[in-house]
Amino acid sequence: MRQFYETYPNPEIVSSLLTQLSWTHHSILISRCKTEAERLFYLQLATTERYSTRELDRQINSGIFERTSLADTKLSQTVHPKSLSGVFRDTYVLDFLNLPSNHSENELKTALVAYLKEFILELGRDFTFLGEEYRLQVGNSDFFIDLLFYHRELQSLVAFELKIDKFRPEYLGQIEFYLEALDRDIKKPHENPSIGVLLCRDKDDEVVEYAISRSLSPTVVAEYEIKLIPKALLRRKLNEFYELLATKEE
């Protein structure tokens, strides 16, 4: 097995990771991953997040490698700081919620809180949950953030706004208002600017690009799926995006 991993660019780092996972973990990585990049991604993720073999298998099934790669590629084309790469994804798979297709925003939020452990596994374990319907007071008015988290590595508050329909540009103004309130009234002096995540049922990437092109707030627009996405579809979507970027560079 060690010889199998010696093809990676940093064999010393990989060698140190080998002993932290079980033989079953490595068997899953060898049999399920198609490329060296994908295999190394899951090797590092499983070690960092301390995934059980069941959790690792689910993440591979959900195509987290493709979803993270797609999000990183898109973030690199925007004003978002590089530190967001690898933290947020283009699509979140929430199949564990068992929601009906015609669910409401309140049903989505209630289910996410009820299955908070599974949701944090999907987000990444550096996320710490601070509360739902988090109250902000601005002037004489009260406003409520759907879900508020704190990300330990980024040292930032992360506000999640849940939308059960397609992304609309006006949603961006709402989340930017919340981020300004968090930064002025909640954020501690040593913490970094707050980050917003608009979790929509669907999105048009071109509309999103136009909407965030002049935005200075670190905001991520992602979509969610209530059913597992076929990995073949994710791979095709990622390849199409790479081809589009290559065409633009020519």
Image: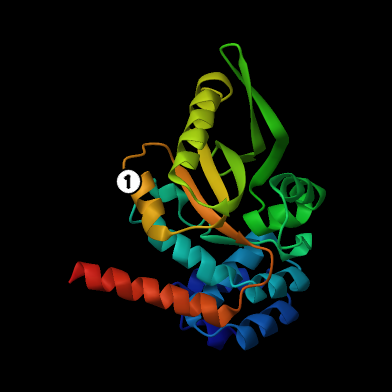
Q: Residue at x 52, y 36 (%)?
A: 175
The N terminus sits in image quarter? bottom right
- Image coordinates for residue 138, horizontal then vertical, percent: 57, 17
Q: Nearer the viewer, residue 189 or 205?
A: 205
Q: Is residue 52 left or right of residue 203?
A: right
Q: Which residue is mark 1?
A: 213
Residue 10 occupies quadrant? bottom left
Q: Vertically, is 149 above or below 53? A: above
Q: Is residue 121 visible?
A: yes
Q: Position of residue 20 (x, y in %)?
A: 68, 68
Which is more toward the observer, 125 or 214?
A: 214
**As displayed, is residue 192 above or below residue 222?**
above
Q: 94 or 150: which is nearer to us? A: 94
Considering every residue shown, the one lying at the far left of the view is: 250
Residue occupying image coordinates x 71% and y 33%: 133
Instruction: List x then y, in percent, for residue 2.
Output: 58, 84
176, above or below 47, in the image: above
Answer with left or right where residue 72 lies relative to residue 97.
left
- Which residue shows up at 36% across the image and 58% down it? 206
Circle 1: element type: loop
